[in-house]
Image: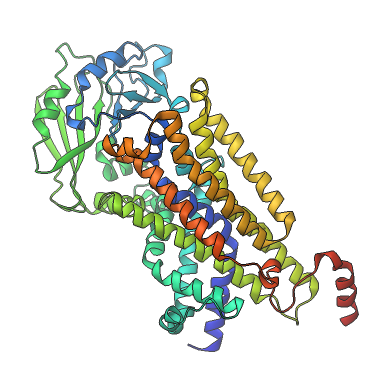
Amino acid sequence: MSKRNYNVFFNTHTVSGIVISVALYVIFFAGAFALFKDEITAWEEGKHSQNIAREHIDFDGLIQKLSKDYYLESRDFRFILGDKSDEIFVLINPAKDTINAPKEARSSAYFSLNINTGKTKTYQEKYSLGEFLYRLHFFSQIPSIGVYLAGFVAFFFLFAIVTGTIVHWKKIVSNFYQFNPKITLKRVWTDAHTALGVIGLPFQFIYAVSGAYFCLSILVLLPANTLYNGDQNKLMNDILPERNIQEWVVKTEKSIPSMNAFIEDSKNSWDDFHINEFWVKNYSGVNMKYLLAGELEDDKRFLGQGYIEFDTETKTKTILKNPNKTHYVKDIQLSMGRLHFANFGGIWVKVIYFILALITCFVIITGVLIWIEARNKKSRTLKQRLYSTKVGHIYMAICLSLFPVIALFFLVIKLLPEAYDTQKMGILYNGFFIVWLVAVIYFRFKRNNYFTNKTTLLIGTILGFLIPIANGIVSNNWIWNTYRANQFDILLVDLLWICLSAIALFIFYKIKPSVQTQSAFKKHPIDYKNIKQLKLEDSQKK
């Protein structure tokens, strides 16, 4: 590679990495916890689920209970079944019969439904810390543009990965084996950045591609939308035929067929087939249809999604997609989902993803430290050096303070009185960001990256060890109790925090203070107490 091309790739890698570093750190750190979204929700509620198989849910009974609170005629609704939780989610579309339907039925509804009691909770009432962290990892809390911002961060992350691989290609193997924490500061960060970057490279590439795909799906569909001459309904009907909207005709005079009977008849259509979604279209109409969606066990077939439709008028059943056959569009989307959310291989794959996400966070931090140290040159003016170190202080404050803040709100949510359960969304939105902002401001003006690192590790460790203790006191879900009760989702969260806190404590004791690390400059540390004198000396040099 020519020197010019090398410099182009190197500068592209550096600039793209620095610009997105903070946002990328938040995405991966929050995303690591978002992998266990359902487990965190179960831990938060502290209630043992009955683990009812999805095919054994009494849908007929649930519909009867829903009809007491909602006008269902001429509406489409969708049951999102999840895996083991006793709570499923229901999305009810607006009524199509605008003549006979009451006014309140002309808007959609989204809520959780308990499959045992039939009780419902609105999205706000059901909101949990797991949902908050899941949405934080793609900036959903930023209105309108948050998800697109996360998508562009993922896109530029792909640039950083490709250019970083090109730049370090000849040194990847040697740097991987020559890592030595006792050498110079810049060399430590560079070798650690390269070595851990190599370990997580396939994982990071998957997340860069899939993250950009999910968050920028509107751009993915633009070329297809052009081919369909702007007819989005036809486009979506071809891409997602199971979600196509059919016009309301008229109310049927026949009795509504049993949903339970349809599911019972369909569940054994294929071996190891498990349902995860159920649709009802044009409820109580002559063109009413049931649609069942499910997947094969991932160890049987990695991409095995199947759809079965039942026409209630003609009593005919149609297989829209055989899970044993490949379908390009659907399998692409399913593969992206499986790879991004670790929906394969069981809980151990999620644990591996969690570790790789934290490794990626370390790679991001070391990249920032390399950038700071590389600008600590005698040839640079004091103003330039001050700018670099200020940026470093801000970046480190934002990134490193996220660990103790997340640990704190695990405790806050667990210790929150039951009377405030329905106010979790407001507490998380207001409290989390306020506490995080205060921590960032404090550490930024402390101007000491070593202090920031040590303090956040210590506070996060203490709070992390308190999390399983708080769970035991409040919910009686001590580790030994959840293990005996086979409530491994709740147990997993406690063990996760114990391990994470133990590792943080180990790092805390291994980090030693030095003049170099305290100032983030090795050869030419800046003395902030004598900054005026330094500026005078710098002007005299000019």
Asked whether residue 306 is in view, the answer is yes
In front: 463, or 211? 463
In front: 318, or 54? 54
Give the side of residue 113 with respect to residue 388, left or right: left
Asked whether residue 153 is in view, the answer is no
Give the side of residue 504 with respect to residue 523, left or right: left
Number of callouts in the render? 0
In front: 435, or 113? 435
Residue 129: x and y in percent read: 47, 37
350 vs 485: above or below: below
Name the residue located 61 percent from the left edge and 59 percent from the top edge. Answer: 453
Name the residue located 45 percent from the left edge and 74 percent from the top edge. Answer: 195
Quadrant (top left, top right, bottom left, bottom right) of the C terminus: bottom right
89 vs 154: above or below: above
Name the residue located 67 percent from the left edge and 57 percent from the top edge. Answer: 394
The structure's colour scheme is rainbow
Residue 90: x and y in percent read: 33, 27
Name the residue located 30 percent from the left edge and 26 percent from the top edge. Answer: 77
Q: Quadrant of residue 368?
A: bottom right
Residue 24: x and y in percent read: 52, 57
In front: 35, or 188? 188
